[in-house]
Image (cartoon, helix red, strand yellow):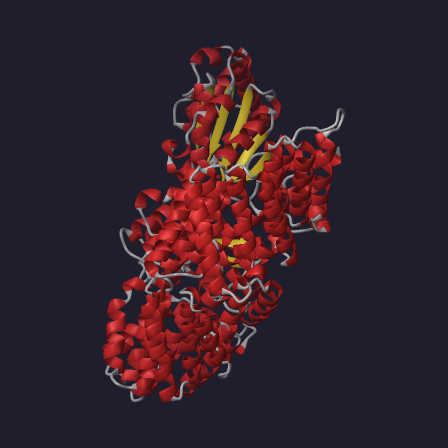
């Protein structure tokens, strides 16, 4: 069977374009085995041909015959070309078996395609019947797989004959799979399956051989839209570049030529439409329609692989396609398109932008309009637009106003850094540093470069040195530089130096009358003192910071006293307070697309996970990762938060993968903060997956790093109880006992009331594992009871449920089945209420291990109710989509039934998968069946 042969294909070993295609290959195999004809669709480079090649290899290994034809644009007008190609692959003995009255039609069709002598053109009816008979005889002897690649280019004669034959040759011994670009259906009676883009993890696997930094690989996935060919082409441009400076990388010449060639294939009116979209700031189908362009042009451009129409929003993949399209147009064409757009865009700032881009002449009045529009855009959170407008203002400033031009360049760099726009920041900074700029302007653009680097501050030493030289003895200039040195020291793990730099920055800012910088510097002091075990000093510094005016610099809300007060509430288990404050801050920053949005989203996700709001945690963390991917900023922190959310409510396998990515990215950027956090969540994921030795080793790395860097705050990164548990399970009981005792001592110094602290209860749970290992289960059960009550009081249901699982395991080892089942059942109910999918599975497994109890008692009944309750967590729309998909409907069929777009159905289905803890339609169908029993 082809199914068995497909199982022998090993992904990357059979070509990079097969990475992530296992499920697609299985889906095609299932459909063709049922006698259905399949049409694979997708843009160029998505991997359709590779899938067909894999199917061909599998079919040959299974002992079948493969007939494979690839259409070509230059052959589409030559009648019978595809049939001739097929005929060369068929032994002549099968042709001789065709009835004599039809046999000539087969040969004549082939000869016509190659200009040979014929007795005249065959009748269409005779050709159809002849090829039907020929294919039937082939299938009668052995299984046949007909593969039609680039089916949109197959000549009309061949397409007509093959369509007729395909409709009539039935049965599972004749299978048909075609591939074509999106557009009109090229073959009748085929079931269309879009070839999906790669996931971020699959893109990372594809690009592994390039040894790219995680930040670069993450950005490549976003820029390529998951298209394997584009990702590989873009990867070749990076080579061994490091992400610290984040300078934009030029498009590879091969890709530039490919884009130019694809654009050249479009009609003139479609090229104008693509140019209009490329010049628009945020192109949409509606905007193009208002500009007088046709939607059919968008469809043609999408079929050519130049852009994507995402529910009316147009995206270029990669984004640099827009720049290539603009470069290929003449200045006059660009000017006309900008004037058209200026007349149809809805906001004043965009109108000014297009008017400025329509002409390159200096204009003082236009410059003033651009600056005003930039200020408005920044106030509205549109930093990308604001930065571009400042850059345009500098470019349109008359030559005799050089000081103004430099100021607008500095503003462009600062706003660009807040919006994570490396192209604009570097262009503006290079121009300022090359000019006779004022020291304050030079310091400001160097600060913008530092802020742009994100967590990769280890590579900024040269920029810091230049900023200090430019600042001289001016406290107003030195204060913000020293503040950034404080942050850089903290990222590197130099917490004592971080505190010193923060204190220096606070004094300098106070001297200069800069209350905003002083407040942030005091906040940095508070953070440094908190993580190094000086809680009283931390509280004094944060109180002083909160007493100053609450003003957040653009893009820096996440370093303000107010934000860090919310984070401290999170550390202190005041979770409702933390979540409330963070959601208010999210409302302030969610209009933008920058690092401060990412940090707030991450913090809400981590808080929600600790509260047991698992679906919410996954949504917030996923949003943070998507923003990071689009911006190309440091991915380590966002992957850490997503790993935490997945560990709580998603999937252990994904949690492990994201944690590993976080560790790798943090190592590359020498970010000790998120290296420790990534190692912690990776250790947790490994231990919960059953790999206690490796998980414990990860946690020991965290301990060693914290000791090296002088960190003594068990409430901040809570690895201590996890490590003690791992040590106890490995039989290293003395080490576990010593660690628990040391942590209790540190905790007494770090918090005012350890008896109401979650870390205390985590240590109780770890000590219970230790006591049970030492042969004192009664003491272990007593400790677990205290921990369960404590976590219930703190409203941390996942921690409470973990205590119940430990209790169940101890009781089961004592052969006390009833208490073991009771604890596992209680844990299952808790985790189900929280939609904590991996925890729920662990609880269900624990319940299974407890046995059936009384004779006739059914374990299925025990578990069916939680499954039904799980479906009750879905919204009405999600429930309806889950039911339809579980019954076998495709996304398009669901969309048609519910009057939704396919994209909306896909988004709903993603949430359904997360809430139910499934990863495929098959698993969803099985779970739906179980819930209905």
Give coordinates of residue 184: x percent, y percent: 56, 43
Position of residue 898 in the picture relative to residue 434 (left or right): right
Evaluate whether residue 315 shows in this view. no
Evaluate whether residue 308 shows in this view. yes
| Residue drawn 26% across the image and 77% down it | 468
Give residue 411's quadrant in the image: bottom left
Give coordinates of residue 479: x percent, y percent: 34, 80
Give coordinates of residue 905: x percent, y percent: 63, 48
Q: Which of 856/383 is in front?
A: 856
Position of residue 667 in the picture relative to residue 577 (left or right): left
Quarter of the image that includes the C terminus: top right
Position of residue 165 in the picture relative to residue 672 (left or right): right
Give coordinates of residue 224: x percent, y percent: 42, 51
Q: How many marks?
A: 0
Give residue 832's quadrant in the image: top right
| Residue drawn 47% across the image and 38% down it | 729
Task: Tell me: residue 79, above or below residue 4.
Answer: below
Q: Which of 370/89 is in front?
A: 370
| Residue drawn 56% across the image and 70% down it | 585
| Residue drawn 62% across the image and 33% down it | 812
Position of residue 27 in the picture relative to residue 406 (left or right): right
């Amino acid at each position: 069977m082809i199914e068995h042969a497909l199982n022998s294909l090993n992904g990357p070993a059979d070509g990079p374009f097969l990475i992530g295609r296992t499920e697609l290959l299985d889906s095609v195999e299932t459909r063709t085995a049922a006698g259905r004809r399949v049409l694979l669709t997708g843009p160029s480079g998505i991997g359709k041909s590779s899938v067909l090649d894999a199917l061909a290899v599998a079919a040959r290994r299974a002992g079948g015959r493969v007939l494979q034809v690839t259409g070509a644009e230059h052959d589409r007008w030559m009648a019978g070309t595809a049939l001739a190609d097929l005929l060369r692959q068929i032994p002549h003995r099968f042709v001789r078996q065709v009835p004599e009255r039809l046999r000539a039609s087969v040969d004549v069709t082939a000869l016509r395609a190659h200009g040979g002598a014929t007795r005249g053109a065959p009748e269409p009816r005779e050709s159809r019947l002849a090829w039907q008979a020929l294919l039937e005889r082939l299938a009668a002897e052995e299984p046949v797989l007909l593969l039609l690649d680039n089916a949109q280019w197959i000549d009309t004669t061949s397409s007509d004959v093959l369509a007729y034959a395909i409709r009539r040759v039935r049965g599972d011994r004749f299978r048909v799979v075609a591939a074509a670009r999106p557009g009109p259906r090229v073959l009748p009676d085929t079931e269309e399956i879009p070839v999906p883009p790669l996931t971020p993890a699959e893109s990372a696997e594809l690009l592994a051989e390039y040894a790219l930094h995680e930040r670069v690989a993450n950005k490549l996935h976003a820029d390529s839209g998951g298209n394997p060919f584009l990702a590989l082409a873009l990867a070749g441009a990076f080579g061994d570049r490091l992400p610290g400076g984040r300078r934009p990388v030029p498009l590879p010449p091969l890709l530039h030529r490919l884009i130019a060639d694809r654009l050249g294939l479009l009609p003139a009116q479609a090229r104008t439409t693509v140019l209009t979209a490329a010049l628009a700031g945020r192109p949409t189908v509606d905007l193009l329609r208002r500009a007088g362009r046709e939607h059919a042009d968008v469809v043609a451009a999408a079929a050519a692989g130049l852009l994507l129409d995402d529910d009316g929003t147009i995206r270029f993949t990669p984004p640099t396609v827009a720049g290539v399209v603009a470069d290929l147009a003449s200045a006059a064409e660009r000017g006309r398109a900008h004037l058209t757009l200026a007349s149809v865009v809805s906001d004043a700032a965009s109108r000014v932008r297009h008017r400025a881009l329509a002409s390159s002449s200096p204009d003082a009045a236009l410059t003033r309009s651009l600056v005003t529009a930039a200020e408005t855009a920044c106030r509205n959170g549109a930093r990308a637009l604001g930065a571009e407008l400042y850059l345009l203002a500098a470019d349109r400033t008359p030559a005799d106003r050089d000081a103004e031009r430099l100021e607008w360049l500095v503003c462009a760099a600062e706003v660009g850094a807040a919006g994570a726009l490396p192209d604009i920041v570097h262009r503006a900074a290079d121009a300022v540093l090359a000019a006779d700029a004022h020291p304050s302007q030079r310091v400001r653009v160097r600060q913008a470069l530092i802020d742009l680097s994100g967590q990769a501050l280890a590579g900024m030493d040269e920029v810091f040195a230049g900023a200090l030289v430019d600042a001289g003895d001016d406290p107003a200039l030195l204060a913000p530089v020293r503040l950034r040195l404080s942050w850089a020291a903290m990222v590197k793990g130099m917490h004592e130096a971080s505190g010193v730099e923060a204190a220096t920055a606070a004094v300098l800012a106070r001297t200069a009358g800069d209350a905003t910088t002083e407040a942030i510097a005091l906040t940095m002091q508070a953070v440094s003192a908190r993580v190094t075990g000086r809680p009283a000093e931390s509280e004094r510094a944060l109180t002083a910071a909160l007493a100053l005016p609450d003003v957040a610099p653009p893009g820096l809300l996440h370093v303000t006293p107010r934000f860090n007060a919310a984070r401290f509430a999170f550390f202190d288990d005041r979770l409702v307070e933390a979540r409330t404050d963070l959601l208010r801050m999210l409302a302030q920053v969610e209009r933008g697309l920058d690092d401060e949005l990412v940090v707030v989203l991450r913090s809400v996700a981590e808080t929600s996970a600790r509260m047991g709001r698992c679906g919410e945690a996954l949504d917030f963390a996923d949003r943070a990762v998507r923003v990071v991917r689009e911006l190309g900023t440091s991915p380590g922190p966002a992957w850490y938060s997503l790993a935490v959310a997945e560990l709580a409510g998603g999937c252990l396998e994904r949690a492990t993968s994201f944690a590993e990515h976080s560790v790798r990215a943090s190592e590359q950027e020498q970010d000790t903060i998120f290296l420790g956090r990534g190692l912690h969540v990776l250790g947790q994921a490994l231990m919960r997956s059953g790999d206690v030795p490796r998980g414990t080793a990860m946690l020991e790395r965290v301990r060693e790093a914290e000791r090296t860097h002088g960190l003594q705050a068990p409430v901040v990164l809570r690895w201590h109880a996890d490590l003690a548990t791992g040590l106890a399970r490995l039989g290293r009981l003395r080490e576990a006992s010593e660690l628990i005792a040391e942590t209790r001592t540190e905790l007494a110094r770090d918090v005012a009331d350890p008896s109401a602290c979650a870390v205390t209860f985590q240590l109780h749970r770890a000590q219970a594992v230790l006591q049970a290992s030492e042969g004192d289960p009664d003491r272990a059960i007593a400790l677990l009871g205290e921990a369960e009550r404590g976590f219930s009081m703190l409203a941390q249901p996942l921690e409470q449920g973990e205590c119940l699982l430990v209790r169940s395991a101890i009781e089961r080892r004592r052969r006390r089945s009833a208490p073991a089942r009771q604890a596992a059942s209680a844990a299952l109910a808790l985790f189900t209420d929280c939609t904590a999918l991996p925890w729920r599975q662990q609880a269900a497994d624990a319940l299974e291990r407890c046995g059936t109890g009384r004779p006739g008692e059914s374990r299925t009944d025990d578990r069916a109710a939680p499954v039904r309750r799980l479906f009750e967590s879905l919204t009405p729309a999600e429930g309806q989509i889950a039911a339809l998909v579980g019954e076998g409907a495709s996304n398009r069929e669901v969309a048609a039934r519910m009057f939704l777009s396919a994209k909306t159905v896909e988004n709903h289905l993603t949430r359904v998968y997360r809430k139910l803890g499934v990863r495929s339609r098959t698993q969803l169908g099985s779970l739906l069946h179980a819930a209905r029993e």
